[in-house]
Amino acid sequence: MSDPVPVLDACCGSRMFWFDRHDSRAVFVDKRSESHTLPDKSSKGGSRELIVNPDLVADFTALPFSDASFSLVVFDPPHLIRNGKKGWLAKKYGKLEGDWKEELRQGFAECFRVLKPAGTLIFKWNEHEVPVSQILALTPQLPLFGNRCGKTSKSHWIVFLKPDDQPQP
């Protein structure tokens, strides 16, 4: 990518919430690059394709970008712990394994590292298995605001603003 882009999606998955899944203002990163045929009774033929095809294959705990590279970072990490690796939910959303709290702590730190001073981090979390309060405790940064959404109000969209004067690591 020759021209810098202002937005990073640090774990894009299938880019489900993007209006334009190929938006040129963003670089899409995920540690997975894969496709699956998933059962879907609402789709013609009873299935649909799930495609995870990032611009760059990388892990959100070690992003290959310089400090202060992006004005906006989207961080929607996997939120499932108990789902099996082969289950369709794990294929769709990814799965947390091992020391997942440390992994998410590192993910927050990396997202803030590549975020410009006064930049915005949009964090998405579904607390079906882990309460959002436990996840927010993994970063010293304080959220500005957020909201709950979804059928059972378990998905949270939370906005952070990186301080202007935050020292770079």
Image (spheres, helix red, strand yellow):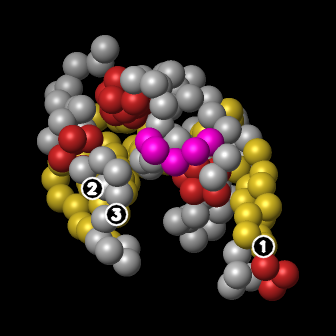
Q: Residue 105 occupies which quadrant of the picture?
A: top left
Front label number (2 vs 3): 3
Describe residue 52's horizontal placement relative to residue 150 as left or right: right
For residue 137, above or below residue 153: above
For residue 50, above or below residue 137: below
Kindly state the secondary structure of the residue where label 1 is placed: strand
Describe residue 58's horizontal placement relative to residue 160 as left or right: right
Under mark 2, the amino acid is Ile
Residue 113 location in percent, x, y?
36, 26
Residue on which the image places disc 3: 155
Kindly state the secondary structure of the residue where label 2 is placed: strand
Describe residue 93's horizontal placement relative to residue 125 as left or right: right
Kindly state the secondary structure of the residue where label 3 is placed: strand
Residue 69 location in percent, x, y?
46, 32
> Main SS type for the magenta part?
loop
Residue on which the image places disc 1: 47
**Residue beneath the point at 67% across and 46% down:** 86
**Residue beneath the point at 47% across and 37% down:** 96
Residue on which the image places disc 2: 158
Residue 25 location in percent, x, y?
57, 53
Does the segment drawn in magenta span residue 168?
no
Task: Determine crowd level at label 1: few under 14, some 14-19, many 20+ residues with C-alpha closer than 10 A.
Answer: some
Mark 2 vs 1, N-terminal side: 1
